[in-house]
Image (cartoon, coloured by chain):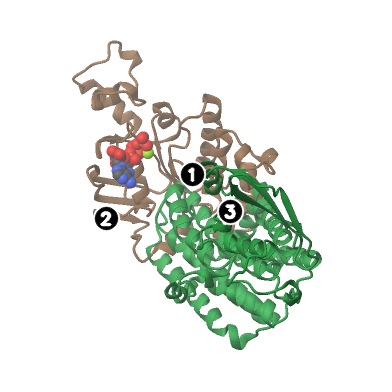
Amino acid sequence: MNVEPIIEIRNVHKSFKTVQAVRGIDLCISPGQFVAVLGPNGAGKTTLVEMIEGIQQPDFGDIFIMGKTWKGNEKYLRHLIGLSLQETHFIDKLSVWETLRLFASFFEIGKDRCEETLNLIGLEEKRKAWVVNLSGGQRQRLALGIALLNKPRVLLLDEPTTGLDPNARREIWAILLKLKNQLNTSLVLTTHYMEEAEQLCDYIVIIDHGKILKQGSIAELLGEIQDLPVKPLEIRKITLDDLFISLTGRHLND
Amino acid sequence: MIERISHNQLFQLILANIRELIREPGVLFWGIIFPILMSLGLGVAFTRKKDVVTNIGVIGQTHFRKITVPDDKLGNNTFIFQSLTWKEAMIKLKRGNLNLILEEKNGAVQYHFDPMNPDAQLTYLKLARVLNTPTSLGKATNSEILPLKVNGTRYIDFLIPGLIAMGVMMSCMWGVSYAIIERRSKKLLRRMVATPMKRSNFLIALITVRVMMNFVEAGLLFLFAWLAFNITVQGNVAALFALFIAGNFAFAGIAIFISSHTAKTEVGNGLINALSMPMMVLSGVFFSYHNFPEWSIPVIQKFPLTMMADGIRSIMTEGAGFAETVLPIAILASTGLIFFVAGMKIFRWH
Ligand SMILES: Nc1ncnc2c1ncn2[C@@H]1O[C@H](COP(=O)(O)OP(=O)(O)OP(=O)(O)O)[C@@H](O)[C@H]1O
Ligand SMILES: [Mg+2]
């Protein structure tokens, strides 16, 4: 990797009153890379991602996006990134189309791109439906659409499929996979689902208690399983799940 | 050109707020129908003098049952006498069923009533005249009473400006702070500031839409009052507009300040109640604050609601113009500005 990283995180720390949410994380993400941040509840995923998004400030350490810090470059960086938060409720009584138009206006983007986005997320039929009447999966697709409006160089998605049924989850995956082949976009996505990380991402970061436990490509991580103290019973069933449990001592969805 | 405007974030924010507002059925009722019903109810109750029926408690036996004093100027007065024991009389007094008790002692009629209660005093004066007992308080005979019927002196003339000002206060305080707190608690604020949206545009859009809505509301209330009660604006209409805008801005600024931090609607509600309730009672919306103790009046006159209500009233009924209202306009506008700026400083977007 001799390309300049699109995101560089150096020794970042963040505490809330009594909790140390992130305790010294270093991470480099190259352009076009799709990275999954895996971890159980309370691992510090949201805190980490929101620091990358410039929504929260680290207590210590530095974050660079395309070589720039948030301080002093907010306006520039906001145009480059797209994101969806873990939980956002859009305005209940606006339609899908109106919501897209509203967010597009923040980026000074016109109708055509909204139309494109609507197609991309497959909500043409729901164009006039109020947000309040959408299903969970449709809402997540709308959130994803809003994240994609400005054709971001960096896409940050916090648990985009949590709480969705397998079908709705696959619809989101399909959109993201299409993106992977088309756009020059890097993705950081947090998830509880091993399968999601395997399907979408080339690089996996496992965190718990605010620290990175392991990172690497899927092949690298699976290779390491050979050296684990707790060995899976049958070799052919080895998955990332086994790695995860042996690292954290708990299941992902605990 | 049109396409350019429709990309404009302030335009889209305003549009979103308008859509949200008109898609909320409660807005129509609380914003438009309710104030009209209130002015209709209060206006009719206090403007057309109707027959007054007063219950009088009589201790012991009485041969009186009912006396009606015809009066085509002030409305007929009917007194209904009830024989009661002291105990029964006290209960009825406490419940507000009667406010005066008669007792015959040594051939003289004694009046028992609370001298602090103006209704009771009025009953006493009227009744004493009927019973032909000399009174020191009331010497006026009916022929000396000249009812005033000039527009501008009726209760409805007093009420409508107060209702307009109160509507603006309520609409701004509740509407603006509810919108902010709700968007904060739903993490929508956080999502919006994670885009290149200009933060001030968010608040400007919110205020603009409120002012627009308040214009419609006040306009309809005025239209109704004009049709039903023949109310007019006797003073300078431009000054009225300026005052109206300044008042809106003052209350919207206060609302932004109140909701600058919390993500809990209960906290917002509490703060708004704590501020708006005293003003509703004290600021002379429904009755003049000149009934309050002397020392409190200068304080009351500094409340934004008092300034707005008094200002609108002076323009509508006394024919005032900019000269008389420039001070309240300036004070209200700067109140809004100060709270807006202070609120923006401490505003929690996340
Ligand atoms: N605003 C906050 N105030 C106090 N504590 C917080 C705050 N945000 C996060 N925390 C704490 O920091 C830790 C990490 O939280 P974070 O939300 O980053 O976890 P997460 O990995 O995203 O979990 P989940 O999978 O449940 O979303 C948790 O212990 C959490 O309680
Ligand atoms: Mg989280």
The x, y position of residue A239, in whole percent, is 34, 21
- Judging from the image, mark 2 belongs to the subunit labelled A
Percent coordinates x, y for residue B311 in the rendering: 60, 77
Q: Do marks 2 and 1 share a subunit?
A: yes
**What distance separates the C-alpha of mark 3 from that of mark 1?**
69 Å
Q: Chain drawn green, letter?
A: B
Q: Quadrant of the C terminus of chain A?
A: top left
- Classify mark 3: residues with Cα within 10 Å, few (<14), some (14-19) or many (20+): many
Nearest to the eye among marks 3 and 1: give it: 3
Mark pair 2, 1: CA separation? 27 Å
Q: Is residue A99 left or right of residue B72?
A: left
Q: Are marks 2 and 3 in contact (CB under 8 Å)?
A: no
Residue bearing mark 2? A62
Mark 3 on the same chain as mark 1: no
* Residue B125 in view here: yes
Q: Is residue B327 placed above or below A239 in the rendered structure?
A: below
Labelled pair 3, 1 in contact (Cβ < 8 Å): no
Vertical order, B92 against B116 (above or below): above
Identity of the residue drawn at 51% across and 42% down: B87
Which mark lies nearer to you, 2 or 3?
3
List the residue tagged with mark 3.
Answer: B102
Q: Colour of chain A?
A: brown
In the rendered structure, find residue A166 and report the number of the disc placed on it.
none
Bin the neighbour count of mark 1 within 10 Å (Cα to Cα): few under 14, some 14-19, many 20 and up: some
